[in-house]
Amino acid sequence: MEPVFEYVFPAIRGIQAGREYYTSMCPLRLIPKIFLFDEEELVPELRAQRTLNKARVPEMARYILNNKENYVFSAITASIDADVKFEPIGDTPGVAHRVGTLHIPMDARFIINDGQHRRAAIEAALLEDPDLGDETIAVVFFLDVGLKKCQQMFADLNRYAIRPSKSIGVLYDYRDEHAIISKNVALESPVFKDVIEMERSTLSQRSRKLFTLSAIYFATKELLDGIPVDDKEKTNIALEYWAEVAKYIPDWELVRNRKMTSSEVRRDFIHSHGIALQALGKTGNFLLKNNPSDWKKKITALKNVNWSRSNSKAWEGRAMIGGRISKAANNIILVTNYLKIQLGLQLSPKEIQVEEAYLREKKGV
């Protein structure tokens, strides 16, 4: 009888839908070696995963390498096409019967149902730092002889997956400097006190909030882009800038003082939507870089801006398409252009290009 070479994993045996599955810990250095099956060579009907998005891999690998002390990766889920053997540490029912060793032949085929990008990122990170190989990741193994169920498993694993809102992502992120600054601004600024929705990235008509945390994040990120100071000073700059802007948009204070409802303001004006905040951030960034000594004087011209949605001559095609707010990248540039023109500021070559295209379209040329 030929010797059988096999992988042996410490494992916990479980049951789902009448089928056994096994949870184990796998050293990172084994992940690229075990999961070798190249699904890119298969037609979609035979794959168990979406095609690998290679653009995501370097960022994920960098996440591991930059956060060796506190990175977190969830379990990889895989199907095994082989006859495996589980040996419990004890024969009596209970914990001893569920804990043991899982023996998998080395010629087994493994298909990743969930985690192919984690696998690729681990492989890339190991190339830069082989010492990571001693760390482990949880792997959930399902038995699937013939790989007949792996596609359905992928569909089921992703059936109820919901990407968290950008706002709650910002709220819980302590790595991104812009997320930290935005949270500080949202919590410390008198302008935004009690009017920020911290979890959702959209506001319902009945919401008493005026802005979302994600809108503050994107606007403040634009404001501070390329400003060469530390995070504490960036927070102070953002607090000062938004306080100055608020002087010329009195509706914001009316909402804070409960003299107007946020739904009324958002219904009737552009200035309380993310596109306007982001444009104000981009305008502020230009002022801080090009008019550092007199930006407050320049910004007084905001008092002359008619933010009303009924001002269709200004906003239709810039901030609105058919009367509805548009968050497209070109619309953000067009609103920024309008603000910069009102403040007497110079447009960049790209902004000029977008503005000229907008004017040609408006004239029907």
Image: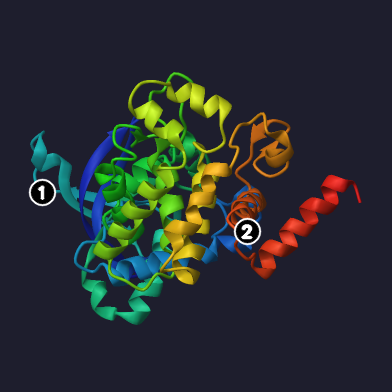
Can residue 176 be seen by looking at this rendering? Answer: no
Q: Is residue 8 left or right of residue 338?
A: left
Q: CA distance from mark 2 to mark 1?
A: 40 Å
Considering every residue shown, the one lying at the far right of the view is 365
Can residue 226 be seen by looking at this rendering? Answer: yes
Is residue 124 or residue 286 the one in the foreground?
286
Is residue 242 or residue 114 the one in the foreground?
242
Is residue 197 or residue 338 the one in the foreground?
338
User: What x and y, as percent, mark residue 301?
Assistant: 54, 50
Is residue 213 or residue 1 the one in the foreground?
213
Helix, strand or loop under label 2: loop
User: What x and y, as percent, mark residue 363?
Assistant: 87, 47
User: What x and y, as percent, mark residue 300?
Assistant: 48, 50
The crowding category of the residue bearing disc 1, from other C-alpha atoms within 10 Å (few below 14, some 14 to 19, many at least 20), is few
Q: Is residue 87 left or right of residue 335?
A: left
Identify the image's colour scheme: rainbow, by chain, secondary structure or one colour.
rainbow
Disc sitting over residue 42 in the figure: 2
The crowding category of the residue bearing disc 2, from other C-alpha atoms within 10 Å (few below 14, some 14 to 19, many at least 20), is few
Q: Is residue 116 left or right of residue 309?
A: left
Q: Check disc 1 and give the amino acid type.
A: Ile
Q: Is residue 95 left or right of residue 81?
A: left
Position of residue 110 relative to residue 310, above or below, is below
Query: Which residue in the protein does label 1 denote?
Result: 89
- Image quarter of residue 105: bottom left
